[in-house]
Image (cartoon, helix red, strand yellow):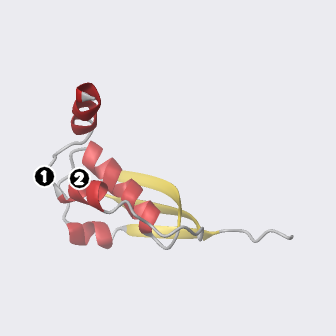
Amino acid sequence: MRWTLLALVAGCGVADSAACDWAENRGSCDECYDGEMTCTLDGQTVTAGTCGDCQALHALSVALCDAGSEVSEEQIENADCELERATPTNR
């Protein structure tokens, strides 16, 4: 258990940064699928299946945290994101 905790803490960049706080505290997202969203901020780009922008911004915050970024919460909320709509399937 102790090693797991140390690995989790060591895996995140600046532990008291807005990105790490977001990554730790905003992971609860609605369960739906609007499509794949790509978000870019501070040199980090992620693509994630998302409901609204929740999962994509969470994935971005994890990447920013791991990179040691010190962007603000407002910058994360206003990250450059583009949604590729899901293709409807015929049933």
Quarter of the figure with residue 79:
bottom left
Query: Where residue 7 sits in the image (x, y, percent)?
Result: 27, 31
Q: Is residue 16 left or right of residue 54?
A: left
Q: Quadrant of the C terminus?
A: bottom right
Quarter the N terminus occupies: top left
Residue 62 numbered mark, or none: none
Position above or below: 14 against 8: below
Q: In the picture provided, is 29 more to the left or to the right than 25?
A: right
| Residue that appears at 27% across and 60% down | 25
Identity of the residue drawn at 21% across and 51% down: 69
- Which residue is tagged 2? 20
Q: Residue 30 placed where, x, y %? A: 49, 70
Q: CA distance from mark 1 to mark 2?
A: 7 Å
How many numbered circles does the render carry?
Answer: 2
Local SS, label 2:
helix
Q: Residues within 10 Å of mark 1 (few under 14, many from 20)?
A: few
Q: Residue at x 21, y 45 (%)?
A: 68
Q: Quadrant of residue 72?
A: bottom left
Residue at (23% x, 72% y) in the render: 74
Q: Which residue is mark 1?
A: 16
Q: Amino acid type of disc 1?
A: Asp
